[in-house]
């Protein structure tokens, strides 16, 4: 099987040549169950897990028995902080917790390779020559996307030092700018196309291998 290729785009969005991609990363079988598992885990890890309420043991007051056990005609009660009382604690009160779901490292990398291969196989992956952006320009980024002609939403992957590229694309609607270390399967599933600088592409291939 021939190695997959992606167009190398200059600053105007025109293809200058084709870049050969690593088959082990961009030409693997897509496994939907692993992608689903990875996206689910990423969404769960993003939850804050800070919801909390006070149980009957945490609310103030209620130390004294409100009335004697017998002879009043009322239901027996030991505290005014019980859940059925106004101002009482919450029954089964939620407490801060982690929603993280464990995904094996090999499974996570396989899901990432599958998502990248899907975009490469559908010709929705492009490589950007970062030298075409000597200074930040949102207009130049928009013109590049118009010339390239791929569907949005778009994920743009840049290295931390490529600030001019990041600043050029980050204000565009339905465009998400990420560093290679931030790239997740969920972002690739959300996007219809992916654009990576040459340096960022090399780093992505290292992380997915």
Image: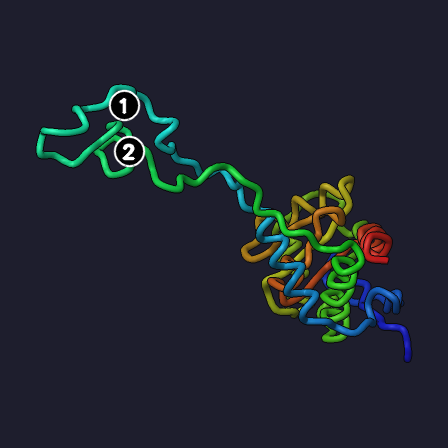
Q: Which residue corresponds to the image point at 68% horizontal and 65% vertical from the top-left?
A: 35
Quadrant of the snapshot with the C terminus: bottom right
Q: Is residue 146 above or below residue 182?
A: below
Quadrant of the snapshot with the N terminus: bottom right
- The answer to the question of whether label 2 and label 1 lie on touching residues, with beta carbons closer than 8 A, is yes
- Is 177 situated left or right of 72 in this image? right
Q: Is residue 191 above or below residue 80?
A: below
Q: In the figure, residue 106 lies in which quadrant?
A: bottom right
Mark 1: which secondary structure?
loop
The answer, for residue 90, to whether it is visible in the render is yes
Picture coordinates of residue 144, whole percent (x, y): 68, 60
The one of 96 and 154 positioned closer to us in this rendering: 96
Picture coordinates of residue 81, whole percent (x, y): 28, 29
Query: Where does label 1 land, which residue?
Result: 62
- Is 201 situated left or right of 103 in this image? right
Picture coordinates of residue 201, whole percent (x, y): 82, 56
Query: Where does label 2 land, which residue?
Result: 82
- Residue 73 bears which disc, if any? none
Crowd band around label 2 with a 10 angstrom C-alpha radius: few (<14), some (14–19), many (20+): some
Q: Which residue corresponds to the image point at 19% horizontal and 33% vertical from the top-left?
A: 76
Q: Identify the colour scheme used.
A: rainbow
The answer, for residue 14, to whether it is visible in the render is no
Q: CA distance from mark 2 to mark 1?
A: 8 Å
Q: Which residue corresponds to the image point at 39% horizontal and 42% vertical from the top-left?
A: 92
Q: In the figure, residue 33 lies in which quadrant?
A: bottom right
Q: In the figure, residue 39 lies in which quadrant?
A: bottom right
The one of 36 and 164 positioned closer to us in this rendering: 36
- Is 78 situated left or right of 170 in this image? left
The one of 61 and 98 positioned closer to us in this rendering: 61
């Amino acid at each position: 099987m021939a190695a997959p290729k992606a167009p190398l785009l200059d600053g105007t969005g025109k293809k200058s040549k084709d870049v050969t991609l690593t088959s082990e990363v961009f030409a693997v079988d897509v496994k939907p169950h692993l992608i689903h598992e990875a996206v689910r885990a990423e969404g769960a890890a993003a939850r804050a897990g800070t919801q909390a309420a006070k149980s009957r043991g945490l609310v103030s007051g209620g130390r004294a028995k409100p009335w004697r056990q017998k002879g009043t005609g009322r239901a027996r009660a030991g505290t005014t902080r019980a859940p059925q009382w106004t101002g009482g604690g919450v029954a089964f009160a939620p407490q801060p917790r982690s929603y993280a779901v464990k995904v094996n490292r090999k499974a996570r990398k396989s899901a990432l390779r599958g998502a990248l291969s899907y975009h490469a196989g559908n010709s929705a992956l492009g490589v950007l020559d970062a030298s075409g952006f000597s200074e930040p320009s949102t207009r130049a980024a928009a013109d590049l996307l118009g010339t390239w002609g791929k569907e949005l939403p778009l994920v743009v992957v840049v290295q931390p030092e490529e600030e001019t590229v990041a600043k050029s694309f980050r204000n565009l609607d339905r465009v998400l700018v990420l560093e290679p270390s931030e790239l997740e399967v969920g972002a690739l599933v959300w996007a219809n196309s992916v654009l990576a600088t040459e340096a960022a592409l090399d780093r992505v291939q290292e992380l997915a291998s």
